[in-house]
Image (cartoon, helix red, strand yellow):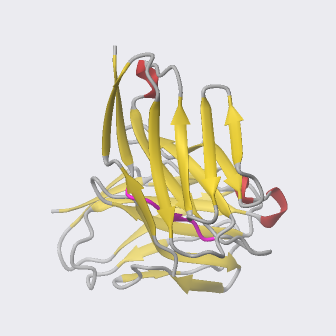
Amino acid sequence: GENVEQHPSTLSVQEGDSAVIKCTYSDSASNYFPWYKQELGKRPQLIIDIRSNVGEKKDQRIAVTLNKTAKHFSLHITETQPEDSAVYFCAASMSTDSSYKLIFGSGTRLLVRP
Amino acid sequence: DGGITQSPKYLFRKEGQNVTLSCEQNLNHDAMYWYRQDPGQGLRLIYYSQIVNDFQKGDIAEGYSVSREKKESFPLTVTSAQKNPTAFYLCASSTPGTGPSGYTFGSGTRLTVV
């Protein structure tokens, strides 16, 4: 089955700097890669996602890149702000017509220092 | 509450007892999922259901049971066979019509064994 590894487990950056979180996946059939942000005690919230037919996607200060050959994808946050502090999870899925089972990475705790 | 409701928010269980966590959605989603989250770890899939009266085991199904008698409901029972049930439990739902971005999480149930 699919296995997703995520690095680093913790990341501390100065406000205004960039943050990069990396994930690798094992199943080459995976075709959907979302990123979630989870604040303490709350539900994960989807912040950006990418499909396997796209190499890069950007939404304001957030971008995701995908390298299918190497089977890794990354989250890039630019101009970080204190409110970006949270735990971030990557996930991978092979979507089917009926459902898609997300397999999550272990998470990265991002701390943005004011 | 985002269309998917989990209850209770906090649950305490004595050793040897079975407890049932509720998950209800009004999004008309076909598929529903249960994940377990431990501190410092990602979300691990317990069970998922693609359609009413059908469900499949995830990666850590031992000690858990589910039912899917109605499209809206996917309760999770934590049995006495689950030796380490203390965790944060998240329910989610999705439907193929909205694509993978339609993966919605509930607000979670924190289960503690006392």
Most prominent secondary structure in the magenta stretch?
loop
Tell me: residue A88, above or below residue B102.
Answer: above
Left or right: where B103 falls relative to B61? right
Residue B15 in picture, x, y percent from top left? 17, 74
Tell me: residue A3, above or below residue B42.
Answer: below
Front-most of A89 and A15? A15
Residue A109 in picture, x, y percent from top left? 34, 41
Front-most of A9 and A17? A17
Front-most of A108 and B42? A108
Res. A99 image quadrant: bottom right
Residue B98 in picture, x, y percent from top left? 81, 56
Q: Residue at x 45, y 16 (%)?
A: A16
Q: Which residues are magenta?
A: A101-106
Q: Residue at x 53, y 25 (%)?
A: A78
* Residue B2 visible in the displayed image: no
Verify whether residue A102 appears in magenta.
Answer: yes
Left or right: where A106 falls relative to A29? left
Residue located farthest toward the right when viewing the structure as drawn? B97
Residue B96 in picture, x, y percent from top left? 79, 66
Q: Residue at x 39, y 79 (%)?
A: B60
Res. B84 image quadrant: bottom left
Q: Residue at x 60, y 26 (%)?
A: A61
Tell me: residue B8, above or below residue B16.
Answer: above
